[in-house]
């Protein structure tokens, strides 16, 4: 079984809709991250969490919110989706003691019409 | 603001040759630098980590160098194989997070 899973894998939604992307991990890591990837721009950090009570904004948090329901679960919400949020979204986990290597999920391809 | 630049052009090489990728950065003093591999439609996969006090790291056919004076890392794939075809991302890290470059796509011709 995959260590980091994301649901859904693909989603098409309409402008103005609320949508939630979910991430679960079995690696036992405290740190979790949400990124978006756009062609030519690389991965950009949206939010990160170092434990259940510690959530931090990344470089592009506007229009997004997150919830860390448990050590193993980290959800990303788009409160009112807009077309320029169309992208590939990745969740990742890491363990600082292991050099902070990040382990990525398979990604969610989100299209906002 | 910090900036991370990787080879802007895709790299096409013949099987058996060495691929060399560059990662340059400005306005940043990372504690370490990592390289990841990403296949189409998949999440990045960690390859190598090198810390600011290290000059070179090797893993099988991969070698990475880190020059904090030049603010540059070089990533080498020796004896390249078609299976090495992918996009390679460099990432600069501190105690809190990684910042990624846009990646360089490598295609190895048989």
Image: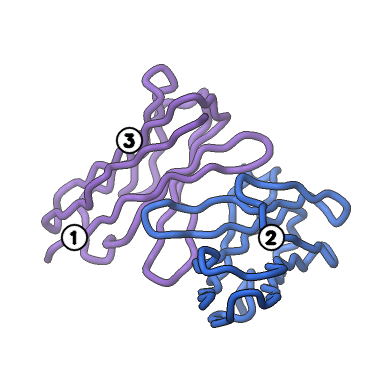
Chain colours: A blue, B purple
Q: Chain of mark 2?
A: A
Residue annotated with mark 3: B74
Q: Position of residue A83 (x, y in %)?
A: 52, 69
Residue annotated with mark 2: A64
For disc 3, the neighbor class at 10 Å (few under 14, some 14 to 19, many from 20) is some
| Label 1 to label 2: alpha-carbon separation | 39 Å
Task: Give the number of marks.
Answer: 3
Q: Position of residue A76 (x, y in %)?
A: 70, 66
The residue at the point 43 percent across, 44 percent down is B101
Residue annotated with mark 1: B108
Q: Is residue A37 above or below residue B73?
A: below
Q: Tell whether B45 sits left or right of A8.
A: left
Q: Are marks 1 and 2 on the same chain?
A: no
Q: Chain of mark 3?
A: B
Mark 1: secondary structure = strand
The residue at the point 54 percent across, 70 percent down is A107
Where on the picture, by quarter, is residue A89? bottom right
């Amino acid at each position: 079984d995959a260590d980091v899973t994301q649901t859904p894998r693909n989603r098409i939604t309409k402008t103005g809709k609320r949508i939630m992307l979910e991430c679960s991990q079995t690696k036992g890591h405290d740190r979790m991250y949400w990124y978006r990837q756009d062609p030519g721009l690389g991965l950009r950090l949206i939010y990160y969490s170092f434990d259940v009570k510690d959530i931090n904004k990344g470089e592009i948090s506007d229009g997004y919110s997150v919830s860390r329901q448990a050590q193993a679960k980290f959800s990303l919400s788009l409160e009112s989706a807009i077309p320029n949020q169309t992208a590939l979204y990745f969740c990742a986990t890491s363990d600082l003691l292991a050099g902070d290597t990040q382990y990525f999920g398979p990604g969610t391809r989100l299209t906002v019409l | 603001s910090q900036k991370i630049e990787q080879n802007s052009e895709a790299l096409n090489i013949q099987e058996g040759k060495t691929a060399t990728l560059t990662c340059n950065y400005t306005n940043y003093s990372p504690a370490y630098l990592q390289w990841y591999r990403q296949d189409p439609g998949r999440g990045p996969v960690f390859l190598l980590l090198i810390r600011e006090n290290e000059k070179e790291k090797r893993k099988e056919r991969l070698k990475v160098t880190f020059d904090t004076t030049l603010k540059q890392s070089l990533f080498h794939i020796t004896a390249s194989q078609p299976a090495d075809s992918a996009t390679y991302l460099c990432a600069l890290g501190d105690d809190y997070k990684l910042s990624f470059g846009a990646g360089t796509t490598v295609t190895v011709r048989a």
